[in-house]
């Protein structure tokens, strides 16, 4: 059978390409695919034990069996609905984030509160007792596995609604591409009728969950060079979207 394999972030660098077509034996598993890639692309082998795998935009695991025409994506740990329940916006974009417009889109006649979290590029990082002094970032470059990222953003919104049913509108937007210090990179916003109905907790949950399961990565460019910034969370079957397991 034939499958399409995509590589992102450090895996793309190590593979020396963004994609390849691979022929495997019928009944091959994800573990078989990783073993084949390690043999065919030795430069990739060191990263495969910790690489995350997705099949057709959902997380997959070693024992999962592949099928003809599957799209398989490999990437490092990530760096972050129902229309009837209220407006839900989830998007990966190269465009500048218009914070006011996005909040306006989840403001209903019944809305009395909105909690907004926005992350931005930090140009200088100060670490306590660091003799080297402040760490400087010249630019961040964000990349994403867009189809899966937007599907997992929808999952984040679904999880928020399950935990905080009073939330009216939800925004989950991530910007990609090269971004300078001070530039907003991500927006999580939740609206509700009142401030004491969970909007603070829901927005905090949204950004934390995005950082765990949404396949977005960043490359940090500084005076000394550039490096991909990887996370530490490893998804489990429990992180699969309901109904997709």
Image (spheres, grey):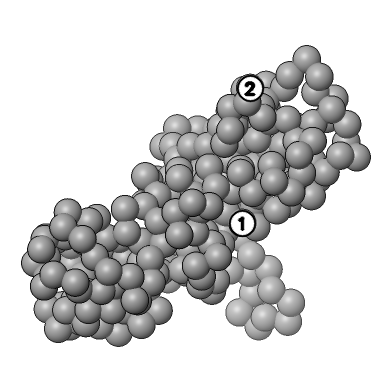
* Residue on which the image places disc 1: 209
Q: Position of residue 149 (x, y in %)?
A: 44, 49
Q: Are marks 2 and 1 in contact (CB under 8 Å)?
A: no
* Number of numbered discs visible in the structure rendering: 2
Question: 26 or 130: which is nearer to us?
Answer: 26
Q: Quadrant of residue 46?
A: bottom left
Residue beneath the point at 81% across and 19% down? 110
> What separation in Å lies between label 2 and label 1 (alpha carbons)?
22 Å
Is residue 140 or residue 134 the one in the foreground?
A: 140
Closer to the chain start, of discs 2 and 1, is 2
Image spot of residue 81 (x, y percent): 57, 36
Can you give x and y, in whole percent of width and height, for residue 182 in the image?
A: 59, 45
Residue 42 in view? yes
Q: Which mark is residue 162?
A: none
Q: Is residue 77 above or below residue 166?
A: below
Given residues 181 and 218, the one toward you in this image is 218
Task: Answer few, some or many: residues within 10 Å of disc 1's Cα (few below 14, many 20 plus, some between 14 and 19).
Answer: some
- Tell me if I can see residue 173 in this picture: no
Q: Residues within 10 Å of mark 2 (few under 14, many from 20)?
A: some
Give whichever of 142, 150 is nearer the camera.
Answer: 150
Residue assigned mark 2: 105
User: What residue appears at the point 37 percent right and 44 percent down from the top-left corner?
Assistant: 147
The residue shown at (64%, 49%) is 159
Q: Residue 129: which quarter of the image? A: bottom right
Helix, strand or loop for disc 2: helix
Taking the spot 36% from the left edge, 52% from the top edge, the residue there is: 57
- Tell me the quarter of the image containing the C terminus: bottom left
In the displayed structure, does residue 74 sit left or right of residue 108?
A: left
């Amino acid at each position: 059978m034939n499958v399409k394999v995509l590589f992102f972030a450090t895996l793309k660098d190590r593979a020396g390409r963004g994609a390849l077509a691979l022929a495997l034996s019928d009944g091959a598993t994800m573990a078989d695919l990783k073993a084949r890639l390690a043999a065919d692309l030795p430069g990739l082998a060191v990263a495969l034990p910790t690489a995350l795998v997705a099949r057709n935009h959902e997380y997959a695991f070693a024992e999962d069996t592949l099928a003809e025409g599957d799209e398989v994506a490999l990437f490092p740990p990530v760096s972050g609905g129902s229309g009837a329940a209220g407006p839900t916006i989830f998007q990966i974009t190269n465009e500048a984030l218009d914070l006011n417009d996005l909040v306006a889109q989840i403001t209903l006649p019944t809305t009395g509160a909105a909690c907004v979290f926005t992350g931005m590029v930090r140009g200088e990082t100060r670490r306590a007792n660091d003799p080297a002094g402040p760490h400087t970032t010249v630019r961040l470059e964000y990349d994403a596995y867009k189809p899966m990222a937007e599907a997992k953003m929808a999952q984040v919104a679904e999880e928020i609604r399950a935990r905080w049913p009073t939330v009216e509108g939800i925004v989950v937007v991530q910007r990609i591409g090269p971004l300078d210090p001070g530039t907003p990179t991500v927006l999580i916003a939740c609206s509700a009728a009142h401030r004491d109905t969970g909007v603070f907790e829901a927005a905090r949950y949204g950004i934390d969950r995005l950082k765990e399961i949404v396949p977005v990565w960043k490359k940090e460019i500084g005076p000394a060079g550039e490096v991909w910034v990887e996370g530490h969370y490893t998804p489990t079957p429990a992180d699969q979207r309901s109904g997709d397991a």
